[in-house]
Amino acid sequence: MSRWKPHDNWHTDLAGLTVEQLRERRAFAARRAQDAAARGMGRNPKAARDWRTKLRAVEDELLRRGAEDA
């Protein structure tokens, strides 16, 4: 199974991830949100909004755990 396959279960499996995995997901979501909104990349506002929502979910989980760089 692909490392990023669980896009549909993004919110539900955050609690089971390690802090390092959450940081990886945060970086992944931030990159995808930026790419979806970038000029010349075929802007997709709906995808950018969806990735920002996923990014906020990861950041909220990091804050809930008290991670120092959230």
Image (cartoon, rainbow, N blue to C red):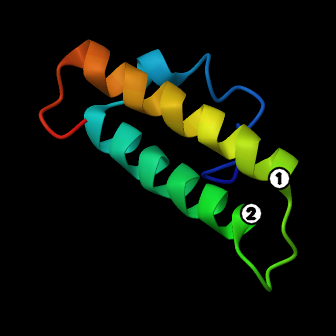
Distance of label 2 from label 1 (alpha carbons): 7 Å
Local secondary structure at mark 2: helix
Residue name at image x 31 percent, y 26 percent: 62
Q: Nearer the viewer, residue 3 or 19?
A: 19
Secondary element at image label 1: helix
Q: Amino acid at mark 2?
A: Ala
**Which quarter of the rendered picture does the C terminus lie within?**
top left
| Residue drawn where x is 80% and y is 80% of the image | 41
Q: Residue at coordinates 40% horizontally, 22% vertically from top-left?
A: 60
Q: Quadrant of residue 63?
A: top left
Where is 70 relative to 65, above or below? below
Q: Quick one: label 1, few (<14), some, or many (20+) residues within 10 Å?
A: few
Compared across the picture, whether 38 is left or right of 56 comes to: right
Residue 42 point in image, percent of width and height? 87, 75
Q: Is residue 43 left or right of residue 65?
A: right
Q: Which mark is residue 45?
A: 1
Type of the residue with mark 1: Pro
Residue 59 in the image: above or below residue 26: above
Q: Nearer the viewer, mark 2 or mark 1?
A: 1
Q: Are marks 2 and 1 in contact (CB under 8 Å)?
A: yes
Where residue 30 appears, as percent x and y from the top left, is 52, 55
Residue occupying the far bottom of the picture: 40
Q: Earlier in the sequence, mark 2 or mark 1?
A: 2
**Crowd tier of the residue under label 2, counting other residues whose Cα lies within 10 Å: few below 14, some 14–19, many 20 or above:** many
Name the residue tied to disc 2: 36
Q: Residue furthest left?
A: 68
Position above or below: 27 against 37: above
Position of residue 59 measured from the top left corner of the image (x, y, whole percent): 39, 31
Q: Position of residue 50 (x, y in %)?
A: 74, 39
Residue at 55% x, 63% y is 31
